[in-house]
Amino acid sequence: MSVVTPPEEEAVVDTEEPQPSLIKRITSLQSVWILGVLLVIVAFFTVTAGGKFFSASNFSLISQNIAVWAVLGVGMTFVIITSGIDLSVGSVLVFSSVVAAKVMEGIGGDSWGTAAIGIVAALVTGGLWGLLNGSLVAKAKIPPLIVTLGTLSIALGLAQVITGGIDIRSVPGALTDFNTYIKILGIPSLPFVALVVVIIGGIVLHKTRFGRYTYAIGSNEEAARRVGVHVERHLIMVYAMMGMLAGLGAVLALAQFGTTTIAGQSLTNLNVIAAVVIGGTSIFGGEGSMFGTVVGLFIPAVLQAGFVIIGVEPFWQGVAVGIVLVAAVWVDQSRRAAALRGAAHVNPILAMFRRNTAASDK
């Protein structure tokens, strides 16, 4: 007589890793930690400068200082997410402002009609420079660093040739009055124009197919191409958008200063790139956010305003921004290295001090 034994129940092992909590996911974002750094800087200047730092006039000054950078930062975020770079934004801004000022000077008058034609001229000029950059990067396969380094020199040189190195001061009154007399909550209008651009840029980056394609190209260009993304066309569009935003930045600069600033934009490209990278956009591509860019933009602006108030030479601003920039890239590299070792959710600050366990086991 045979005995039939019932089959043993197989133990089911749950191999799924527990999902990290919302707080852990938030604190793992580099932009959140950079926001913490910004709050520390603000607290420092609040203590050392007293009520002067938190005054309405100082906040108005800071917001005006980052208005142009914010517009450029939107385009630079897209460019860097694609694993590219654009060093020419400052020179393209200068060239676009020169062309716009020349066009408005030739038409004459202080009306909005003259200003509108100048605005279109600046946008078209910037867009054409962006198309040139994008075509050389996407079609000619020249590294973006080399392409934009070349167009940086060409655009600035042509601007100096056109003007003889002398700034053009004939900006229509309608354009300068827009920044001087139109205020919202006591703040000039330019920061609100920049805010609108940032919001639109954030929606496009995070909520549209264009933004998803941008992330895909930066993460793995070949994989994006295999799933049907037209990589070359998309890169050209990204750089063209960057150029048009540089043209818009030229318009804002003309409205703010009432003149072209041929010699005043030499560090604009570095400041914008530093702000975007500090805000958590990876220089290696495939990662970034518009929120992080905004936070990164405030750091150099707050440092500049704070140093002036407490009487520190403004040259130290470059030193401080450089230190924060290097630290941000270090955090990004450490976090990526930790992720490759299997730590998918790594605190970016602790990643700086985490030992490479794989290396220590050897």
Image (cartoon, helix red, strand yellow):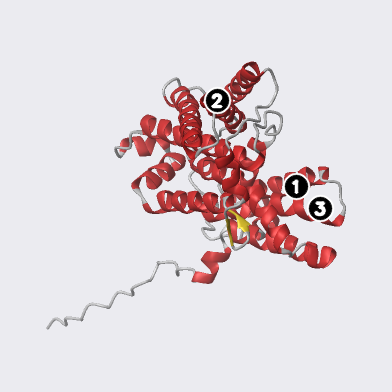
**Which label is found at residue 99?**
2
**Cβ–Cβ under 8 Å for marks 2 and 3:** no
Residue 107 seen in the current view = yes
Quarter in which the N terminus is drawn: bottom left
Disc 2 residue crowd, few under 14, some 14–19, many 20+, Cα 10 Å: many
How far across and how far down the image is residue 299, in percent? Answer: 69, 53
The nearer-to-camera label among 1 and 3 is: 3
- Please tell me the numbered disc located at residue 307: 3
* SS type, badge 1: helix
Q: CA distance from mark 1 to mark 3?
A: 16 Å
- On screen, residue 320 above or below 257: below
Disc 1: CA contacts within 10 A as few (<14), some (14-19) or many (>=20)? few
Asked which quadrant contains residue 56, the reply is: bottom right
**Residue 250 position in % (x across, y down):** 57, 36
Residue occupying the point 29% across, 37% down: 228
> Which image quadrant for residue 149?
top right
Q: Amino acid at mark 2?
A: Val
User: Which of disc 3 and disc 1 is earlier in sequence?
Assistant: 3
Position of 293 relative to 76 (above/below): below
Query: Where's residue 60, x and y in %?
Result: 67, 56
Q: Is residue 361 visible?
A: no
In terms of depth relative to the viewer, which is nearer, 147 or 346?
A: 147
The residue at 22%/77% (across/down) is 7
Q: CA distance from mark 2 to mark 3?
A: 35 Å
Question: Residue 274's x, y, as percent?
Answer: 65, 43
